[in-house]
Image (cartoon, coloured by chain):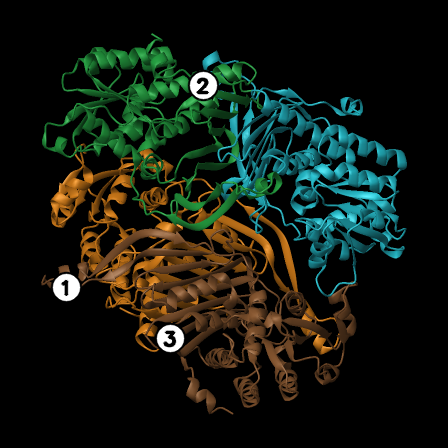
Chain colours: A brown, B orange, C cyan, D green
Amino acid sequence: MGDSMSSARQEPIGVAVIGAGYWGPNLVRNAQATPGLKLRYLCDLDADRARRVLGDYSTVRVSDSLDEVLADPAVAAVAVATPAATHLPVAMAALEAGKHVLVEKPLAATRAEGLRLVEAAESRGLTLMLDHTFCYTPAVRHLRELVRGGEIGTVQYLDSVRINLGLVQPDVDVLWDLAPHDLSIFEAILPDDVFPVAVAAHGSDPIGAGRACVAHLTVRLSNGAISHVHVNWLSPTKIRTMVVGGSLRTVVWDDLNPAQRLSVYDRGVDRTEGTGLGAEVREQTIVSYRVGDMVAPALPEREALRAVMAEFAGSITEKRAPLTDGRAGLRVLAILEAASASLAGGGEFVTVPGDRALDAVG
Amino acid sequence: MGDSMSSARQEPIGVAVIGAGYWGPNLVRNAQATPGLKLRYLCDLDADRARRVLGDYSTVRVSDSLDEVLADPAVAAVAVATPAATHLPVAMAALEAGKHVLVEKPLAATRAEGLRLVEAAESRGLTLMLDHTFCYTPAVRHLRELVRGGEIGTVQYLDSVRINLGLVQPDVDVLWDLAPHDLSIFEAILPDDVFPVAVAAHGSDPIGAGRACVAHLTVRLSNGAISHVHVNWLSPTKIRTMVVGGSLRTVVWDDLNPAQRLSVYDRGVDRTEGTGLGAEVREQTIVSYRVGDMVAPALPEREALRAVMAEFAGSITEKRAPLTDGRAGLRVLAILEAASASLAGGGEFVTVPGDRALDAVG
Amino acid sequence: MGDSMSSARQEPIGVAVIGAGYWGPNLVRNAQATPGLKLRYLCDLDADRARRVLGDYSTVRVSDSLDEVLADPAVAAVAVATPAATHLPVAMAALEAGKHVLVEKPLAATRAEGLRLVEAAESRGLTLMLDHTFCYTPAVRHLRELVRGGEIGTVQYLDSVRINLGLVQPDVDVLWDLAPHDLSIFEAILPDDVFPVAVAAHGSDPIGAGRACVAHLTVRLSNGAISHVHVNWLSPTKIRTMVVGGSLRTVVWDDLNPAQRLSVYDRGVDRTEGTGLGAEVREQTIVSYRVGDMVAPALPEREALRAVMAEFAGSITEKRAPLTDGRAGLRVLAILEAASASLAGGGEFVTVPGDRALDAVG
Amino acid sequence: MGDSMSSARQEPIGVAVIGAGYWGPNLVRNAQATPGLKLRYLCDLDADRARRVLGDYSTVRVSDSLDEVLADPAVAAVAVATPAATHLPVAMAALEAGKHVLVEKPLAATRAEGLRLVEAAESRGLTLMLDHTFCYTPAVRHLRELVRGGEIGTVQYLDSVRINLGLVQPDVDVLWDLAPHDLSIFEAILPDDVFPVAVAAHGSDPIGAGRACVAHLTVRLSNGAISHVHVNWLSPTKIRTMVVGGSLRTVVWDDLNPAQRLSVYDRGVDRTEGTGLGAEVREQTIVSYRVGDMVAPALPEREALRAVMAEFAGSITEKRAPLTDGRAGLRVLAILEAASASLAGGGEFVTVPGDRALDAVG
């Protein structure tokens, strides 16, 4: 992800955080701790809320005016943590003011809106980065190396469960609230030639909240494998596990087990070639089982959002695309929109448009 | 489930076990340990295999002839543990010989075949019982009381995961191999007015085994809730958990945690009535969260198959339907057939025929 | 633990944190977040280290002079997070300057030094509080209610394991580094009439560090029960469990399981009265087993150090003894000194002086 | 452990199991399943109990007379599962009748009695084997290879916890009931030059059972390391973990986690040589920390008692000492007796007599 160390010697990049709600305080804290960044504003329509987030001991300025913040030449970049519906106007205003933008997932409320942001950033040569936080955890970075590096062989299936007693959101269903995490992780770890082609979504709203609170997503991949996501706001137990099955190895990621987040199993089922036996015997012998050791790699304990900020600073300084750029956000939006279409229909598979199709949306 | 104690005082019921493969030895062991049953034969086409199962110290007879066994008037009942494709001829022969029948899941290879067995048993007044073993575990019996007894409130969702490195079967896919467990448990615990109405199945065969090795089943229930089943032969880690979400309580069953199989959470999300506030505020306040204690009920450690045998003996002696009778097996077959139809199609929802429709199949 | 709410309306208490090492940053963060406290200084001999702790955005003053800090009338209280060997001079200087003192565990390097601090505070009517952080966790507060409230019956045994790959300290052994946590928790939860009377300690130094890195502590309590502590700097796995066995219930506290920190078992072994049978039968029947449900009480997630700060503020404002006052720290020192004597000897039991004896030390 | 395969081709060894209580049924089942053994009798003073153990389908003979069994020339070996107090007379009678003997732990009620059995067997050239079952588990066999093979480096500490709601025994305390497991495992895995030299035991009897129900054992080893055992009959939660700390690796064995019984950590604390710095700096730099991967080796699932039986058969056929011979049982008794002496005294360390001293006992 580049070397942002060099940026520390330069003038730090002035940053403003927009939005002092649920996620904003985390951005504030990590922006302050990142070499190469200089936090200048926390901006919220509710200035008191912003003041409470900063506390009584801070030298950071509070503003309730996005215009004021964007007009300040000391601000070179903004981090947007407002509701998804406002991402388009807020981020677009920032881009138009020539600021680099880090935006919370999802990129925008629709794929069309997201594409406008991507094009605005690309045409101006500005960084547009998605805060796909999980992609910056040591676990996912290791997983990415294992999967893209070929150590697990070909990808056979993915399964992600993300359930807990969650805040029922007033504006989005559980798919749009939680699945962006899983989809952006899939996006980050899969090889370039394994990508989503169609998605089916099933959901229910057993508490009458007016939107799906429980949902299952089946994503058919280009190599025939399926990846599955189970998201649920109503579960009293919190589960955050992902299994990535490969022909050589299978990796289990349990994010709630800090002592052993990743388990790499040298275990699996192989198909072996027939050996001239009769049909019946051959049917029973075409698979063999490997049960080898399990390795839990040592992973550093590091806050992912710190790495997000470092990558944001690095991509600006080095004028390169960040790991999770606007197009990555667009690909996640494409799956979410197809999933919503499936959910609104009868749960049938809906085609996920590819990158080329995405370009044609606007 | 009745009181089979009285049967102990009577002449024991002569039993033959048919099939000395994977499951047969368990039936042999438990039949021998059950008061009220007298094991007379272990019958297998491969008599040597049957002899090896019995070992060198047994007084039980071995036979390689089903006819011989069925002709013996000392045999009043048979337990069938042969491949599913043979259930129809074997069980039908037994019923026609006037024997009571306990049959491994699934009841038969098709719903039509299953119905023939049910009708044959009903017309003769014989017991036809399914060995839905899990339904006889202390955990499921307790779960059944909680769910049917109303303690969890209305059922909001069910989720079952049954994955492990499993034997790829030569004749059936992972749905038919594993999902009967989950579906028969749902069948046993759900109230009478909450039943499957449609099912969608997605699967894949990433190792080229010729049949689905990974599958996801979404069952839409009559009350709008969905139950989901994930079965997988390729997972290096074994998971067997079921979550039953209710409006008052949610139960998590982890069958691999003998120290705490059931966890009953007084936790959840409630919808509360609006209070005359504006739309925006109301939207955010219509749900409230309950976070109460969790109770793990004390459960006896008891082998489920022992209870299956006791129920088989009890239903014969008391001339009553067993807990898991032929019709329960038929209902599971109806869901499996609909799931297979969905899998063969594009994964769309397929209607599950109800009991009345089932009667019309033959 | 009193009501510190009222303090919020008054002029906040000016506080200085002394020591910017391992624990100091946590004190800084929590002092800033506590209503009723106003953090004025972070003081460290190494001013650069203090500046790094505060970061680039803080209005808090840095000082490398304890004298300067203590001379400032705006400072009414100090929180001392320096090495244990310096607690006496630092805390004594603060008390002599009329400041209230919160001090890291252990209170001082010796019991005699600790008593001097207690007497200095008592004679001046100043608060001297120990930062026994764990005593302020929701888990220990609940445990305290269960044990002191009689719900678990009489205390039968305590067992605490606190092991992980720990920093080998340059000045203290593993007993003085880790066991104060366990001993202060025992101190907080046990009823007044159950207290330590003697202690035996066994330890070893398998890596040649010059001091015990693995140690086992057996504390004999006044009611005949024993409490045991296992502390270990060399374990690759982190374990932090405490079992409190009672005649009615037993509580297991697993601090690394946030989803279920406390488990209260209605389980145990009872002695029942003999029933006139012969000796042999009676011997086998004098015990009976209870296997009831387990309850995991809902606990709030709350940072313990926040509650420490609130208690410090409350005790100052309300002019009352804090929950973990200097005498509590003195009782922990008494056990540690006896343990060190046992360790230096052959591991025999060494008497723990009681409160009255402690008064006589100075 | 030798190759018992060859024995299968010879005439099987006739065996009698003596004692149909708690453990006897397991011996019966496994003796029947072991090639090379032919179970001829189950002998118990209570013939009805023996009959119930065998069930209604067995061809094995029941006897209530040890004399009858020992007089039968078809019986070449006996497995003794009677109370410890009777091991001397029962096993001695068997040895005097020329039978090989497998005996439950502990070998005998006292070390002196045990030595008489060892000498009786040695003088007659008969096998005397201890059923130290855990030593035959795949986990302990692997652990033995890791420790004795040098892969973990030098042994730094051992810690074993074996607690659960256990049957309070009428004749022995918790030390004699449970600690033989841990001590025999230590015995099996430690290198020859690391052996117990002294032991201190602390215990309590909080329920008034008349003997210790909770006990802690500290065993000082010849290399200065300590091994610790915590046994407890009163714990509502079952724990069976052992940690073996080494200079190169540390192994954690959790016997209740079948999916990951052994975890081998490439993690630890090393002492590094001083580098000419001043004393204070050197003190802080003499240790370094390794945090490498963890490997959970694949282990077969195999019943340990099956391997015990195979080893018994093999040692008889091949006329060699079994892995857990009488002298291994004697070494365990030596520690237990020293522990009891410590417990009866004030908990001070008591010297454990070595092998040479043991020979002198009789």
Please name the residue that numbered disc 3 is placed on: A220
Name the spot of residue A4 as percent of width and height, x first.
55, 70
Cα separation between marks 1 and 3: 29 Å
Residue placed furthest toward the front = D276
Q: Residue at x 64, y 71 (%)?
A: A37
Labels 3 and 2 in the same subunit: no
Q: Amino acid at mark 3?
A: Arg
In-image side of C251 versus B360 (left or right): right
Residue C349 visible from this viewpoint: yes
Question: Which badge, 1 or 3, is on the more N-terminal residue?
Answer: 3
Image mark for residue B237: none
In-image side of C42 versus A205 (left or right): right
> Which residue occupies the foreground of this view, B224 or A234?
A234
Q: Amino acid at mark 1?
A: Gly
Q: Residues within 10 Å of mark 3 (few under 14, many from 20)?
A: many
Q: Quadrant of the N terminus of chain D?
A: top left
Please name the residue that numbered disc 1 is placed on: A274
| Figure quadrant of residue A223 | bottom left
